[in-house]
Image (tube, helix red, strand yellow):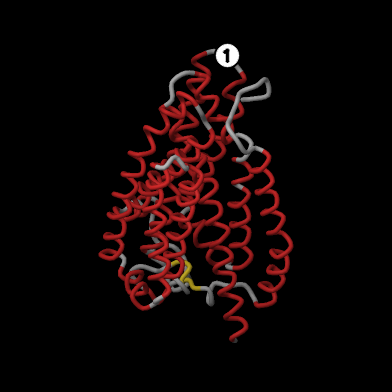
Amino acid sequence: MSGALDLNTMWFFLVGALFAGYAILDGFDLGVGALHLFTRGDEHRRILINAIAPIWDGNEVWLVAGGGALFAAFPNVYATAFSGFYIAFMLLLFCLIFRAVSIEFRSKQPMAWWRTFWDISFSVSSLLAALLIGVALGNIARGIPLDSEGAFHGSFWSLLHPYALLVGVCTVVLFLMHGSIFLVMKTEGPLQKQILSWTKPAIIAFIGCYLALTLSTFVTVPHLAKAFFSRPILYLVALINLLAIINIPRQMKRGRPLRAFFSSATTMLTLLLLFGVSAYPHLIYSHPLAANSLTIYNAASSTKTLWIMLIIAACGLPLVLVYTTSIYWIFRGKVRLDEHSY
C-alpha cells in the first residue's frame, strides 16, 4: 500500500508539473494576445504576433501532455472534469483554435478590415481563454458539487460564482503582466517603450489581485486555509512566492526584463504549488459534501497502469523538455520582420 501511495503522490505532482508548465509557457503568449489590440499600426501588431509565432504551438504541447497524463493516471477525475466543465472546456478549446487561426490568417490578405477582424479575434480569444482557465482553477480550488459516485451536479452558470470569477480575473492580469515582460525582452525602440508603459500598471494590478485573492481564499475556502496552517512546507513556498513577486518590479526598474520574466514564472509556479500542496490529496474537492471528493486514491488507475505510464513519461518528458529548450534557444533575441514573418 505504501508503494501505491508513493506512486499516486508522484503522479499527483507530475500531472501538476505538466499543467504548471503549460500555465507558465502559454500564459505569456495568451498575455501577448490580450495586449495585441493596444498596439497601433500594422508593423507593431505583426511584431507582437511574430514574438510568439514560433513557440505558441510548442507551448500547448504541455496542455496535451497534461491532459493525457490526467486521463491515464486519474481517469475518474478526467471524466468528472470534462463532464462537469464541458461547456467551459469547449469554449476554451474554441478560443485556442480560433487564436491559432487568427495568427495564420491575419496576414493572408492586405485589406485593413481583414486584418482588423483577425486582430480582434486574436485578442478576444486570448483574453477569454485566460479567463476560462482561471474560472476552472477557481472551481477546482473551492470545490464543486459531486454525488457519491463522483458525478457533477450543477450547471455552467453555477460555475460562475464570485470566487471563481475572482480567480479568473487574477489569471488574466497575471498573464497580462507575464506577457508584457516577455514583450519587453523581444522588442526594441518605440514599441518597447510603449510596452514598458504597460508593464508597471500590469504589475500593480497583479499585486492588488494577488492580495484580494489571498484574503478571499482564507475567508471563503476553509479547507485550503486549514491545510496551509497544518503543513509547514507551505510557509517556505509562500516565502519564495512573495520574494518572486517583490523581485518583478525590482528587476524591471533595473532594466533586467529576463530576470523579471523568470521571477514572474517563479510566481506562477509557486502559486500553483501552494494550491497543489494545500489541496493534496484531493484532485477535485466536493463542496459541500467533502466525503464525495475525488482523491489520488479513489480516482486513480491501477498500480500496474501507473507504473507503465511512469516509464512512458520518463521516456517522453525529456523529449518535451529538449524540444521546448531548443525552440526557445533558436528563436531567442529581438523580433525583426522579414519576408518569412507573419
| 47 is higher (above) or lower (below) than 243 | above
Query: Residue farthest to the bottom?
Result: 1
| 283 is higher (above) or lower (below) than 99 | below
Q: Is residue 53 left or right of 122 when viewed as pictured? A: right
Q: Position of residue 195 (x, y in %)?
A: 42, 31
Q: Is residue 302 left or right of 238 when viewed as pictured? A: right
Q: For the C terminus, give its image quadrant.
A: top right
Q: Secondary structure at mark 1?
A: loop
Q: For the N terminus, give its image quadrant.
A: bottom right
Q: Position of residue 320 (x, y in %)?
A: 68, 53
- Label 1 crowding class (10 Å Cα cut-off): few <14, some 14-19, many 20+? few
Q: Is residue 13 left or right of 274 when viewed as pictured? A: right
Q: Position of residue 78 (x, y in %)?
A: 55, 61
Residue ID at (66%, 54%): 321
Foreground residue, 5 or 183? 183
Count numbered badges in the picture. Answer: 1
Q: Quadrant of residue 124?
A: top left
| Dot 1 amino acid type | Pro
Q: Position of residue 127 (x, y in %)?
A: 43, 38
Q: Quadrant of residue 232?
A: bottom left
Please name the residue that numbered disc 1 is placed on. 110
Query: Residue farthest to the top?
Result: 111
Residue ID at (46%, 52%): 263
| 163 is higher (above) or lower (below) than 306 | above
Foreground residue, 288 or 49? 49
Query: Residue farthest to the front?
Result: 254
| 259 is higher (above) or lower (below) than 139 | above
Residue ID at (47%, 43%): 256
Residue ID at (54%, 34%): 186
